[in-house]
Amino acid sequence: MNLLTVSDKECNRVYSPQIKGRFKDVDLAIGCGDLSYFYLEYIISSLDIPLYFVRGNHASEVEYGYGGFRTAPWGAVDLHKKVLRDSETGLLLAGIEGSLNYNQGDHQYTQWQMWMMTLQLVPALIWNKIRYGRFLDVFITHAPPWGIHDQEDRAHQGVKAFKWLIRTFQPAYHIHGHIHVYHPGVITETTLGNTQVINTYGFRKIKFEGEKQARPLAEQLKN
């Protein structure tokens, strides 16, 4: 299956009349933060696919547009502090919003708060393993993990809890944003164990090598 992942920068290859042709084979979209709600809604309405998202540290509390105001993109699923299974693709998804705290703004957290939110995911991840035979397919965050794609300034340091989760539960992908890419020499893909960590600044099209419809373990054993 194919995933369209977006973050931080609105791109004319996505926000385009040609979006259906370019991404006609995409099964699911993922937003990693700091994008307008109308941009995410355009992806949903144009491709008619599910979109899961987390907010970035620059997210608007309220956005005004056609049809009035909204506090989240219409038709999208907020993944913050959740572990969910997409009914169409069978993908197991989990997410954490925001960045590390650097100026007391919205959607900013200390390392300790990030640890607490990450640990809240653990019971559902263990249940995934019991029911589906694996913990997690795609971990979605705005900030990067500690020491991978991050930077030294407080605003762009990585999250220690995310690196622990990746090492412990080994999702196929960890998709993040937050780190802007201004030249081709910036590393945007790193392998950690069995996990491919990807900075999706702008947009990426990712081919997920797995079953289109992952079935519960009980169904697999029955067959």
Image: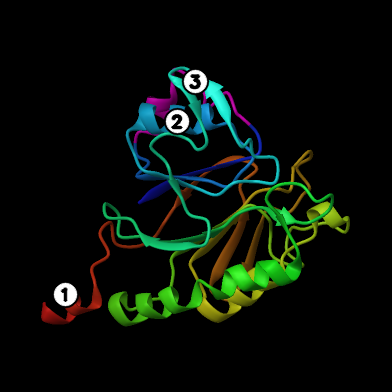
As displayed, is residue 179 above or below residue 134?
above
Q: What number of labels is visible?
A: 3
Say whether residue 14 is visible. no
Q: Mainly helix, strand or loop, the magenta region? A: loop
Disc with the residue nearer the chain's start (3 vs 2): 3
Residue at position x 55%, y 22% in the image:
64
Find out whether residue 66 is within the magenta segment. Answer: no
**Disc 1 to disc 2, how far (Cα)?**
35 Å
**Mark 2: which secondary structure?**
helix
Label whose residue precedes the other's in the sequence (3 or 1): 3
Q: Quadrant of residue 23?
A: top left
Picture residue at 65% right of the left edge, 43% below the top: 201
Q: Position of residue 120 (x, y in %)?
A: 53, 73
Q: Secondary structure at mark 3?
A: loop
Residue span colored magenta:
10-24
**How far apart in space, not on screen, are marks 3 and 1 (Cα)?**
41 Å
Residue carrying label 3: 16
Q: Residues within 10 Å of mark 1 (few under 14, many from 20)?
A: few
Position above or below: 75 against 194: above
Residue drawn 76% across and 64% down?
110
Look at the image and say whether residue 18 sits in the magenta stretch: yes
What amino acid does circle 3 point to? Ser
Q: Which residue is mark 1?
A: 219
Q: Secondary structure at mark 1?
A: helix
Return the residue at label 2.
41
Say left or right for 21 vs 122: left
With respect to residue 17, does 72 lie above or below?
below
